[in-house]
Amino acid sequence: MRKAKGWKKMTPEEKRQKRFEKWLSPPGITFDSAQAEADYIARVTRVIKAIQLEEPDRVPLMTPAGNFPAYYAGYNLKTVMSDYDKLKAAWLKFLHDFELDLFPGPGLILSARQLEMIDHKLHQWPGNGMADDVPMYQFVEKEYMETDDYDAFIRDPTDYLLRTFLPRTNGALAGLRKLAPLTPLVSLPMFYMNRFGDPDVRAALQTMLDVGAEGVKWGAVIGEVGLAAMQAGVPSFSGGFSGAPFDQIGDAMRGTTAIMLDMYRQPEKLLEAMERITPILINEAVETADMSSCPVIFMPLHKGPDGFMSGRQFETFYWPTLKKVMSGMIDEGLVPMLFAEGDYESRLEIIRDMPPGKVIWYFETMNMAKAKKILGNNACIIGNLPITLLMTGTPSQVKDGCRRLIETCAPGGGYILSGSASLNNGNPDNLHAMMEAVKKYGVY
């Protein structure tokens, strides 16, 4: 986003309004037709009103497509991770065959080529540690950040990630361990750059260059698909990706077991590390949103539900820094959209502590009547048609489930219909049924 002069002097509300204006009228977009442009404006307006807790013309639908377009087109996740042409073809087919309020783009379809080039160890994917027909990725949790590493991470996160974490989690980048700290670069840069002559360092840097070049090819396809959707009149619902500081450390760095023990064995270090990365997460969200037309930042939450920690632990270790990340985004005019994985019913009164109409909560497992009662005048809510119903139910049953959710959550505005999770493979008629239901039952 090209910042207007005096951006820093704008209030958060003024920044938000500027971002909404850009979303409504994305620069450089030539629509396929006058009708496509009108549809685009109507769809974005519908969602903005829901975010602001107002009643739009009808309830918006966020189609829970996930990796479904790949399977709908006759491919699988493994194929579209490696073949960018088929990736593009699959998502364009989905765009053209389904009526959508919001486009679930392929931005989270990782490039298998890039993962293989760096010998990536943090995840498994179809054809690499998992069966070819598995429709998702899988975390490989280990203590990639060791128990005694907190001080190094807190002192300089960038240095730690570059010289320690990346070599541990990507085999082809092992040579980065031989780099020196950047400090000598201040006055005598040649002493730092001499390290680049080491064959292992040069090999790691060349791999990074090659992976970056591959990323340009992948990114071009993702961009082409997103552009085609906008030109057809269907907006994106994600301008970036972020998360809770606790999850950032627990998911990829410490692992679930280790971070849960850290809450007891070294809580001060854990809290300090989360504070350290909070502004980093805010800045990253702003930078990605500036490159997009959409101000919504998707934030999947992994370790905050009842099954992982008590209410007291949530209020001590999870919520404070998550709230700071959300507040920092709101101050920059962004809209955090938090996907609360697991059961968050006991957290409702806590997460209500945000300014009204600035946050979206997407619930997986939730008593939606209770969520509407507690959050209805505070935050837009999304969800949560059971994924089991989408997978095994009939279109008639899906429509009835949508009707019940709409009747419960839509009154007064502030509701977006979606599934409890994304559908990776299943009956396309059930996704069509969701749109038919929202058009029949969701009109205000």
Image (tube, rainbow, N blue to C red):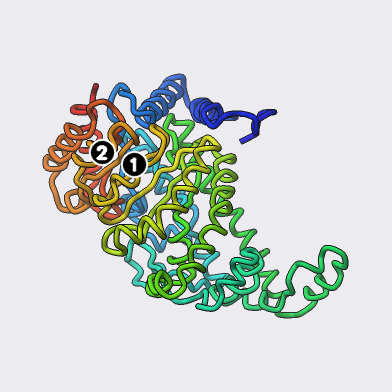
Query: What amino acid type is highlighted by mark number 1?
Result: Arg
| Crowd around label 1: few <14 · some 14–19 · many ≥20 (10 Å) | some
Would residue 176 appear left or right of 344 to someone viewing this image?
right
Picture quadrant of residue 42: top left
Q: Position of residue 287 (x, y in %)?
A: 60, 45
Q: Position of residue 288 (x, y in %)?
A: 56, 45
Picture quadrant of residue 168: bottom right
CA distance for labels 1 and 2: 8 Å
Query: Which labelled disc corresponds to residue 10?
Result: none
Q: Position of residue 160 (x, y in %)?
A: 62, 69
Q: Can you see residue 324?
A: yes
Q: From the viewer's perspective, is residue 138 above or below residue 75?
A: below
Secondary element type, mark 1 = loop
Query: What amino acid type is highlighted by mark number 2?
Result: Ile
Image quadrant for the C terminus?
A: top left
- Numbered circles on residues, count: 2
- Please state which of residues 202 and 18 is positioned toward the viewer in this rendering: 18
Q: Earlier in the sequence, mark 1 or mark 2?
A: 1
- Please state which of residues 188 and 63 is positioned toward the viewer in this rendering: 188
Tell me whether circle 1 and circle 2 mark residues in contact (CB < 8 Å): yes
Q: Position of residue 367 (x, y in %)?
A: 19, 46
Q: Which residue is mark 1?
A: 352
Q: Which residue is mark 2?
A: 374
* Residue in the image at 46% along x and 38% along y: 335
* Residue in the image at 29% along x and 45% along y: 349
| Crowd around label 2: few <14 · some 14–19 · many ≥20 (10 Å) | some
